[in-house]
Image (spheres, grey):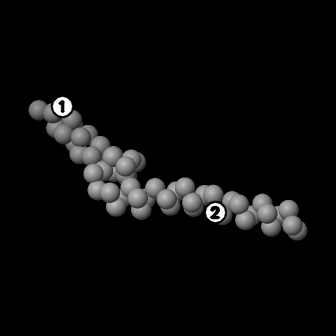
Amino acid sequence: MGHWAWVMRSQHLFFFLIPLICPCSFPSHQSPVTITPYPQRGPRVPQSPIPTKAKVN
């Protein structure tokens, strides 16, 4: 019984972590579209203007 309880808990944790780690796996089309562009544009946008200003100065 204890082992089964642990497996059930681990499955629940996986189900909660899967959408956070891989939003694309979720069936909803809105979640992957809104979550994917942020990480791609976020790190690239702030890094691009910083080096350009540093070179100008």
Judged from the image, the secondary structure of the residue bearing numbered disc 2 is: helix
Q: Residues within 10 Å of mark 1 (few under 14, many from 20)?
A: few
Residue hosting label 2: 45
Q: Amino acid at mark 1?
A: His
Farthest-out residue, right: 57
Number of numbered discs on residues:
2
For marks 1 and 2, give the one nearer the viewer.
2
Task: Compute the Cα span from label 1 to label 2.
Answer: 48 Å
Counting from the top left corner in percent of width and height, residue 53 is at 80, 67
Instruction: Name above or below for residue 24 compared with residue 38.
Output: above
| Residue for point 11% across, 32% down | 1
- Tell whether 42 sits left or right of 35: right
The quarter of the picture where residue 7 lies is top left
Residue hosting label 1: 3
Q: Which mark is residue 56?
A: none
Farthest-out residue, left: 1
Instruction: Name above or below for residue 31 compared with residue 22.
Output: below
Q: Amino acid at mark 2?
A: Val
The C terminus is located in which quarter? bottom right
Pick whichever of labels 1 and 2 is earlier in the sequence.
1
